[in-house]
Image: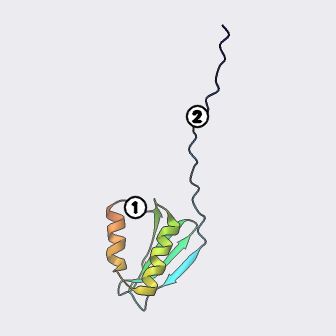
Amino acid sequence: MAETAKKVKTATKRRKSRKVVKDVVFDISEISTAINQIQIKDGKVGIIFQGRDTEYFYNYTENLSEFVKEIEKFVKEQHLSLGKKFNELVRNGTLSQIV
């Protein structure tokens, strides 16, 4: 008896490519008491705080395009405190400061 070998295809997972986020600057000094600007530059998040014009840059570990959408929604609706949101993202590790 001749045995025929069956070819078994293994399923390969498609790698999700991250969307490239263009550099963007959100000037939110009129609607935020703590933050002057939020910059998305070279895949990094920059935050310039009011008063001292202190600037910090962060790596963002999740989908940066979703983060930009959140910021855009805030600018339109002003539905949350951005200072509180950034503190939360730093505490849970989503934003890690670049020193």
Across and down, in percent, residue 7 comes to: 65, 26
Q: Determine the residue positioned at 33% across, 70% down.
A: 87
Q: Residue 94's mark?
A: 1
Say few, some or many: other residues with alpha carbon within 10 Å of mark 1 (under 14 / 14 to 19 / 20 or more). some
Left-right relation of 25 to 48:
right
> Residue flagged by tag 2: what amino acid is it?
Thr
Locate the N terminus and report the quarter of the image it occupies. top right
The residue that label 2 is drawn on is 10
Secondary structure under tag 2 reads loop
Say which label, 1 or 2, has the lower sequence index: 2
**Count of numbered circles in the view:** 2
Q: Determine the residue positioned at 46% across, 77% down.
A: 71
> Residue flagged by tag 1: what amino acid is it?
Thr
Between disc 1 and disc 2, the foreground one is 2
Locate the C terminus and report the quarter of the image it occupies. bottom left
Name the colour scheme: rainbow
Q: Determine the residue positioned at 37% across, 59% down.
A: 93
